[in-house]
Image (cartoon, helix red, strand yellow):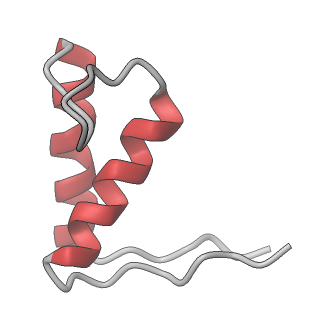
Amino acid sequence: MSKTKYSDKAQDKIGEVMHEFKEGKLKSSSGEKVTNRKQAIAIGISEAKEKGLKVPKKKKD
């Protein structure tokens, strides 16, 4: 079982978003405060993809 590989910059971006989440400052696109950890991670990955950073494709079950 291999670990998914994110670029260092993508990891930094996700880390920044998680920091905002922990401080209670992260907002979703609709302007609502994010309270779910998984949602915060998804926002971080999405923002990293928008910047063109290396993010693995979504895993298919």
Residue closer to the observer: 15 or 17 = 17
Residue closer to the observer: 52 or 4 = 52
Instruction: Please indicate whether residue 36 sits to the left or right of residue 9 in the image.
Output: right
Task: For the N terminus, give its image quadrant.
Answer: bottom right
Above or below: residue 41 compared with residue 51? above
Farthest residue, direction top: 24
Total numbered circles: 0
Q: Residue at x 19, y 86 (%)?
A: 52
Above or below: residue 3 compared with residue 54? above
Farthest residue, direction right: 61
Q: Residue at x 18, y 57 (%)?
A: 12
Q: Residue at x 23, y 44 (%)?
A: 29
Instruction: Please indicate whether residue 34 sits to the left or right of residue 61 in the image.
Output: left
- Identify the image quadrant of residue 27: top left
Q: Residue at x 19, y 30 (%)?
A: 31
Residue closer to the observer: 1 or 23 = 23
| Residue 54: image location, x then y, percent | 31, 84
| Residue 11: image location, x then y, percent | 28, 60
| Residue 47: image location, x then y, percent | 22, 63
Residue closer to the observer: 56 or 29 = 29
Above or below: residue 51 compared with residue 28? below
| Residue 61: image location, x then y, percent | 86, 73
